[in-house]
Each structure stands twice: as C-alpha cells, then as structure tokens.
Image: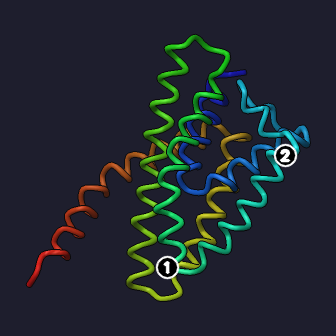
Amino acid sequence: MDWPTLAATGLGSAWLSGINLYATVLALGLLQRFGLARLPGDLGYLSEGWVIGLAALLYLVEFVADKVPAVDSIWDAVHTFIRVPAGAILAASAFADFDTPVRVAALLVGGGLALGAHGSKAATRVAVNATAPGGGVVVSLAEDAVAFGSTLLMVFFPLVFLALLGLAVGLTAWLAPKVARAFRIRRQPD
C-alpha cells in the first residue's frame, strides 16, 4: 500500500473517530466488505459482519442521541473515554504491519488527533446547544456528513484528504486558545 493511502487511512480514521466513531467504522467496514477499498494493516477486520452490525447499531443510537441537547452533552462526555482510545487503536491498527516504534507513534498521534477532533466537536456542540436552540440538529447532521464524506475522501483521494486534515488540525490549533479564552472570560463574574 502506498504511503499517502496508509497515512490518510490511519490518521484519518483516528481523527474522524473524534467526530463520529461509529459512522467512520461503519463506512470503512462497508467499503472493505464490498471490495471498494483495501484497508491497511489490521483495519480489514472492520469488514467483519458483527463489527459492521455493531457499528450500525451504535451509529443509530448516536444519531438519535445527538438530536437531544441534554442527551447530546452527556453522550459526548462519556464518549471522551471511548472516541480517543478508539482513534488511537484505529491508527495503530492501520500500521500493524510495521515495527513496534511505528505502531506506538501511530497510537500516540492517532490518540492526539482523536482528542483534538473530539474536543472541538464537544466544545462546538455545547456552544451551539447553549446559544441556538435546535441548532444542534443541524450541526449533528453536518458532522455525520463530514464523517461519511471524509471517509470516502480519505480512501479514494488520500492526498486531498491529507491536505484537508492538515488544514483542520492547523485551524483547531489556532482556534483552541481563542475558544478557551472566550469561555474563561464568559465565566468570570461581572
């Protein structure tokens, strides 16, 4: 497998797990299952029937949970402990055919990417749910579209995806301190 495809699939699946883990696993599993993609390393196991079924079921639960603001916030809080390790595992699994140092590096980078994506998603959802009633539904549908669309993009156009991933990570790094500062200012008593 060529490096751009390997990097896009490994790092992309980790990053996307922070946005919508179940949609990402479902899409990757179906692409492999129907022979539309060949996933690197141990990611091929995502095409097992029970994995696809479980991912589809959990995606449906998340699809509903994301539309109810209070449930959405609790769901995201709980999934901090699910999406981040899952992203790390997906990245390491993509590099399963490499030596241990490469797999460990993929695990660490994948976890960081998943944490950044999840943190951005969770902060955005809290802000939207607090300021724009009903806006969470629109944002949730956009996240689903990003998860499925980006999965297709990383598999079929890995260089384009890697460029967009770099842009997204850079934008997140630039915005994160500004958002944290805004929250801190807003929390201070008048």
Q: Secondary structure at mark 1?
A: helix
Residue extending furthest left?
190
**Mark 2 = which residue?**
50
| Percent x, y of residue 14 | 56, 41
Q: Quadrant of the N terminus?
A: top right
For the residue pair 37 and 137, the one nearer the viewer reads as 137
Labels 2 and 1: the sequence-earlier one: 2
Residue extending furthest right?
34
Left or right: where does residue 140 sit relative to residue 120? right
**Mark 1 = which residue?**
70
Q: Amino acid at mark 1?
A: Ala
Q: Amino acid at mark 2?
A: Trp
For the residue pair 83 and 133, the one nearer the viewer reads as 83
Quarter location, residue 137: bottom right
Q: Residue at x 65, y 21 (%)?
A: 96
User: Looking at the image, is 51 positioned above or below residue 92?
Assistant: below
| Percent x, y of residue 36 | 86, 40
| Percent x, y of residue 41 | 71, 24
Left or right: where does residue 42 sit relative to residue 82? right
For the residue pair 178 and 160, the one nearer the viewer reads as 178
Q: Residue at x 49, y 14 (%)?
A: 101
Left or right: where does residue 158 sit relative to residue 117? right
Circle 2/circle 1 CB separation < 8 Å: no
Mark sitting on residue 53: none
